[in-house]
Image: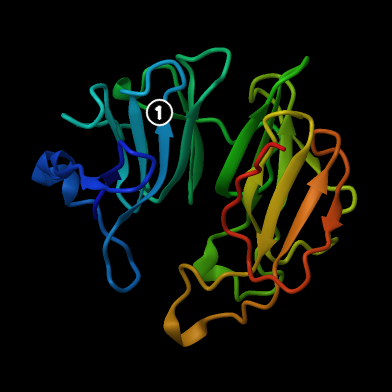
Amino acid sequence: MGLYRSENKGSTWEELKTLLDLPAEVKRNWKSPQPQYQGHVRHIFIDRANPQILYLSIEHGGVVRTFDGGETWEDVSQGIDYFDIHKISNDPVRKDLYFMTSARGFFRSRDPVRGWSRIENNGITRDYFHDFMFLSGQPRVMLIATANGSPGHWNRPGIAQSAIFRSLDGAQTWHPVGDGLPKSMDKMVWALASPLNDPVQVYAGYGQSDKGQAETRKMPTGLGAVWFSPEVGSSWREVKLGEVPAVRAMWIACC
Protein backbone atom coordinates (compact mmCIF):
# COMPACT_ATOMS: atom_id res chain seq x y z
CA MET A 1 0.00 0.00 0.00
CA GLY A 2 1.29 3.46 -0.85
CA LEU A 3 0.32 7.13 -0.67
CA TYR A 4 1.64 9.76 -3.07
CA ARG A 5 1.69 13.57 -3.05
CA SER A 6 2.14 16.16 -5.78
CA GLU A 7 3.16 19.77 -5.16
CA ASN A 8 2.91 20.84 -8.83
CA LYS A 9 -0.64 19.96 -9.89
CA GLY A 10 0.22 16.37 -10.74
CA SER A 11 3.27 16.88 -12.96
CA THR A 12 5.44 14.87 -10.56
CA TRP A 13 4.69 12.75 -7.51
CA GLU A 14 6.53 11.62 -4.41
CA GLU A 15 5.63 8.73 -2.13
CA LEU A 16 4.86 9.52 1.50
CA LYS A 17 6.87 6.63 2.86
CA THR A 18 6.28 7.82 6.41
CA LEU A 19 2.92 6.05 6.26
CA LEU A 20 4.86 2.80 6.48
CA ASP A 21 6.44 3.90 9.77
CA LEU A 22 3.24 3.05 11.64
CA PRO A 23 3.63 0.17 14.13
CA ALA A 24 3.52 -3.42 12.90
CA GLU A 25 0.34 -4.11 14.88
CA VAL A 26 -1.41 -1.41 12.81
CA LYS A 27 -0.03 -2.49 9.43
CA ARG A 28 -0.99 -6.09 10.21
CA ASN A 29 -4.60 -5.10 9.49
CA TRP A 30 -3.79 -3.79 5.99
CA LYS A 31 -4.96 -6.82 4.09
CA SER A 32 -7.76 -7.77 1.75
CA PRO A 33 -9.69 -11.05 1.57
CA GLN A 34 -9.29 -10.95 -2.22
CA PRO A 35 -6.14 -11.53 -4.31
CA GLN A 36 -3.59 -9.83 -4.05
CA TYR A 37 -4.60 -9.77 -0.38
CA GLN A 38 -3.33 -6.22 0.18
CA GLY A 39 -5.20 -3.31 1.70
CA HIS A 40 -5.37 0.01 -0.11
CA VAL A 41 -6.34 3.63 0.53
CA ARG A 42 -9.99 3.90 -0.48
CA HIS A 43 -10.58 7.58 0.35
CA ILE A 44 -8.50 10.60 1.40
CA PHE A 45 -10.13 13.30 3.51
CA ILE A 46 -8.31 16.65 3.56
CA ASP A 47 -9.47 19.15 6.17
CA ARG A 48 -10.91 22.24 4.47
CA ALA A 49 -9.56 24.63 7.10
CA ASN A 50 -6.12 23.02 7.51
CA PRO A 51 -4.81 20.91 4.59
CA GLN A 52 -2.06 19.54 6.84
CA ILE A 53 -4.76 17.37 8.46
CA LEU A 54 -5.52 14.22 6.47
CA TYR A 55 -7.53 11.08 7.26
CA LEU A 56 -7.11 7.90 5.22
CA SER A 57 -9.88 5.31 4.85
CA ILE A 58 -8.08 1.99 4.34
CA GLU A 59 -9.95 -0.88 2.67
CA HIS A 60 -9.21 -3.16 4.55
CA GLY A 61 -7.16 -1.66 7.37
CA GLY A 62 -8.89 1.00 9.47
CA VAL A 63 -8.44 4.76 9.74
CA VAL A 64 -5.15 6.67 10.11
CA ARG A 65 -4.52 10.40 10.30
CA THR A 66 -1.79 13.01 10.18
CA PHE A 67 -1.69 16.58 11.50
CA ASP A 68 1.51 17.56 9.70
CA GLY A 69 0.87 16.77 6.05
CA GLY A 70 2.12 13.21 6.26
CA GLU A 71 5.33 13.58 8.25
CA THR A 72 3.87 11.48 11.08
CA TRP A 73 0.78 9.26 11.33
CA GLU A 74 -1.39 7.68 14.00
CA ASP A 75 -4.04 4.97 13.90
CA VAL A 76 -7.53 6.11 14.96
CA SER A 77 -9.55 2.90 14.47
CA GLN A 78 -10.74 2.28 18.04
CA GLY A 79 -14.37 1.19 18.18
CA ILE A 80 -14.46 -0.21 14.64
CA ASP A 81 -14.99 -3.96 14.59
CA TYR A 82 -14.46 -4.59 10.86
CA PHE A 83 -11.76 -2.59 9.08
CA ASP A 84 -13.27 -2.41 5.58
CA ILE A 85 -13.41 1.41 5.55
CA HIS A 86 -14.97 3.35 2.66
CA LYS A 87 -15.13 7.06 3.49
CA ILE A 88 -14.53 9.56 6.28
CA SER A 89 -15.45 13.25 6.41
CA ASN A 90 -16.25 15.87 9.00
CA ASP A 91 -19.44 17.88 9.27
CA PRO A 92 -19.00 21.11 7.25
CA VAL A 93 -20.52 23.15 10.10
CA ARG A 94 -19.53 21.14 13.18
CA LYS A 95 -15.98 20.50 12.06
CA ASP A 96 -15.09 18.49 15.18
CA LEU A 97 -17.75 15.91 14.29
CA TYR A 98 -16.60 13.09 11.98
CA PHE A 99 -18.60 10.44 10.11
CA MET A 100 -17.28 7.21 8.60
CA THR A 101 -18.73 4.39 6.51
CA SER A 102 -17.61 0.79 6.36
CA ALA A 103 -18.81 -2.50 4.92
CA ARG A 104 -20.43 -3.34 8.25
CA GLY A 105 -21.33 -0.07 9.91
CA PHE A 106 -21.90 3.68 9.89
CA PHE A 107 -19.96 5.52 12.60
CA ARG A 108 -19.58 8.93 14.22
CA SER A 109 -16.88 10.43 16.43
CA ARG A 110 -16.27 13.78 18.11
CA ASP A 111 -12.63 12.82 18.63
CA PRO A 112 -11.47 9.90 16.44
CA VAL A 113 -8.45 9.14 18.62
CA ARG A 114 -10.91 8.32 21.44
CA GLY A 115 -12.91 5.96 19.24
CA TRP A 116 -16.00 5.63 17.03
CA SER A 117 -19.65 4.86 17.83
CA ARG A 118 -22.25 3.20 15.59
CA ILE A 119 -25.16 5.36 14.38
CA GLU A 120 -26.86 3.26 11.68
CA ASN A 121 -30.14 2.90 13.55
CA ASN A 122 -33.06 5.34 13.50
CA GLY A 123 -34.48 4.60 10.09
CA ILE A 124 -31.71 2.98 8.01
CA THR A 125 -32.77 -0.54 6.98
CA ARG A 126 -29.52 -1.67 5.32
CA ASP A 127 -26.19 -2.85 6.75
CA TYR A 128 -23.60 -2.04 4.04
CA PHE A 129 -22.48 1.59 3.81
CA HIS A 130 -20.50 3.29 1.07
CA ASP A 131 -20.52 6.92 -0.05
CA PHE A 132 -22.16 9.78 1.85
CA MET A 133 -22.32 13.53 1.44
CA PHE A 134 -23.50 16.79 2.98
CA LEU A 135 -25.64 19.38 1.20
CA SER A 136 -25.82 22.95 2.42
CA GLY A 137 -29.05 24.76 3.14
CA GLN A 138 -31.67 24.88 5.86
CA PRO A 139 -32.21 22.30 7.11
CA ARG A 140 -28.80 20.82 6.33
CA VAL A 141 -29.06 17.55 4.40
CA MET A 142 -27.04 14.33 4.58
CA LEU A 143 -27.34 11.53 2.02
CA ILE A 144 -25.86 8.04 2.35
CA ALA A 145 -25.66 5.13 -0.10
CA THR A 146 -26.38 1.70 1.39
CA ALA A 147 -27.08 -1.93 0.51
CA ASN A 148 -27.88 -5.28 2.10
CA GLY A 149 -24.97 -7.56 2.89
CA SER A 150 -21.72 -6.93 1.03
CA PRO A 151 -20.50 -7.46 -2.57
CA GLY A 152 -19.41 -10.98 -1.75
CA HIS A 153 -23.06 -11.90 -1.09
CA TRP A 154 -24.78 -10.02 -3.91
CA ASN A 155 -25.26 -13.20 -5.96
CA ARG A 156 -28.20 -14.11 -3.72
CA PRO A 157 -31.83 -13.33 -4.72
CA GLY A 158 -32.34 -9.58 -4.66
CA ILE A 159 -28.66 -8.82 -5.27
CA ALA A 160 -27.57 -5.55 -3.60
CA GLN A 161 -31.00 -4.15 -2.70
CA SER A 162 -29.33 -0.75 -2.49
CA ALA A 163 -31.02 2.39 -1.18
CA ILE A 164 -30.29 6.07 -0.60
CA PHE A 165 -31.26 7.48 2.79
CA ARG A 166 -31.55 11.14 3.77
CA SER A 167 -31.25 12.91 7.12
CA LEU A 168 -32.41 16.45 7.89
CA ASP A 169 -31.28 16.50 11.53
CA GLY A 170 -27.56 15.80 11.55
CA ALA A 171 -27.78 11.99 11.22
CA GLN A 172 -30.20 11.60 14.12
CA THR A 173 -32.95 10.07 11.96
CA TRP A 174 -33.08 8.79 8.38
CA HIS A 175 -35.67 8.25 5.65
CA PRO A 176 -35.33 6.50 2.26
CA VAL A 177 -35.50 8.64 -0.90
CA GLY A 178 -35.95 6.99 -4.26
CA ASP A 179 -38.78 8.42 -6.36
CA GLY A 180 -37.69 7.74 -9.94
CA LEU A 181 -34.96 5.23 -9.09
CA PRO A 182 -35.26 1.58 -10.24
CA LYS A 183 -37.76 -0.29 -8.10
CA SER A 184 -35.51 -3.30 -7.58
CA MET A 185 -32.23 -1.40 -6.95
CA ASP A 186 -30.49 -4.72 -7.52
CA LYS A 187 -27.23 -2.90 -8.30
CA MET A 188 -25.20 -0.64 -6.01
CA VAL A 189 -25.17 3.13 -5.62
CA TRP A 190 -21.41 3.59 -5.36
CA ALA A 191 -20.97 7.35 -5.61
CA LEU A 192 -22.76 10.56 -4.64
CA ALA A 193 -21.69 13.99 -5.90
CA SER A 194 -22.98 17.54 -6.12
CA PRO A 195 -21.85 20.59 -8.13
CA LEU A 196 -20.25 23.25 -5.97
CA ASN A 197 -22.32 26.02 -7.53
CA ASP A 198 -25.71 24.34 -6.92
CA PRO A 199 -25.76 22.40 -3.63
CA VAL A 200 -29.34 21.13 -4.02
CA GLN A 201 -28.47 19.05 -7.08
CA VAL A 202 -27.20 15.49 -6.56
CA TYR A 203 -25.80 12.83 -8.87
CA ALA A 204 -25.65 9.12 -8.01
CA GLY A 205 -23.37 6.58 -9.71
CA TYR A 206 -24.96 3.14 -10.06
CA GLY A 207 -24.05 -0.32 -11.34
CA GLN A 208 -23.02 -3.88 -10.61
CA SER A 209 -19.38 -4.57 -9.82
CA ASP A 210 -17.60 -7.86 -9.16
CA LYS A 211 -15.66 -6.10 -6.37
CA GLY A 212 -15.38 -8.36 -3.35
CA GLN A 213 -16.88 -11.42 -5.06
CA ALA A 214 -15.12 -14.76 -5.11
CA GLU A 215 -13.78 -15.91 -8.49
CA THR A 216 -16.04 -18.96 -8.47
CA ARG A 217 -19.29 -16.99 -8.07
CA LYS A 218 -18.84 -13.59 -9.68
CA MET A 219 -22.02 -11.92 -10.91
CA PRO A 220 -22.35 -10.44 -14.41
CA THR A 221 -21.57 -6.73 -14.17
CA GLY A 222 -23.85 -5.39 -16.93
CA LEU A 223 -24.34 -1.67 -17.53
CA GLY A 224 -24.19 1.16 -15.05
CA ALA A 225 -26.03 4.47 -14.87
CA VAL A 226 -25.91 7.99 -13.47
CA TRP A 227 -29.01 9.34 -11.76
CA PHE A 228 -29.75 13.03 -11.16
CA SER A 229 -31.84 14.73 -8.49
CA PRO A 230 -32.65 18.46 -8.77
CA GLU A 231 -34.00 18.62 -5.20
CA VAL A 232 -31.64 17.14 -2.59
CA GLY A 233 -32.56 13.56 -3.44
CA SER A 234 -36.35 13.78 -3.29
CA SER A 235 -36.81 12.65 -6.90
CA TRP A 236 -34.46 11.24 -9.53
CA ARG A 237 -34.12 10.76 -13.27
CA GLU A 238 -31.48 8.98 -15.34
CA VAL A 239 -28.80 10.99 -17.14
CA LYS A 240 -28.61 9.60 -20.68
CA LEU A 241 -24.97 8.68 -21.20
CA GLY A 242 -25.27 5.69 -23.49
CA GLU A 243 -23.66 2.43 -22.44
CA VAL A 244 -21.43 2.89 -19.40
CA PRO A 245 -20.00 0.37 -16.91
CA ALA A 246 -20.69 0.57 -13.19
CA VAL A 247 -20.01 4.14 -12.05
CA ARG A 248 -17.72 3.78 -9.04
CA ALA A 249 -16.59 7.41 -8.54
CA MET A 250 -17.73 10.87 -9.67
CA TRP A 251 -16.66 14.50 -9.42
CA ILE A 252 -18.92 17.24 -10.76
CA ALA A 253 -17.08 20.15 -12.39
CA CYS A 254 -18.49 23.64 -12.13
CA CYS A 255 -19.14 25.50 -15.40
Q: How many marks?
A: 1
1 sits to left or right of 241: left
Circle 1: element type: loop
81 sits to left or right of 149: left
Q: Is residue 16 above or below residue 199?
A: below
- Please name the residue that numbered disc 1 is placed on: 116
Residue 181 visible? The answer is no
x, y percentage for residue 29? 23, 51
Which quarter of the figure has residue 93? top right
Q: Is residue 19 above or below residue 95?
A: below
Q: Depth check: 3 or 27 in front?
A: 3
Tell me the residue at 29%/57% (across/down): 39
x, y percentage for residue 138? 78, 14
Q: Is residue 113 above or below residue 8?
A: above
Residue type at the position of mark 1: Trp
x, y percentage for residue 195? 70, 36
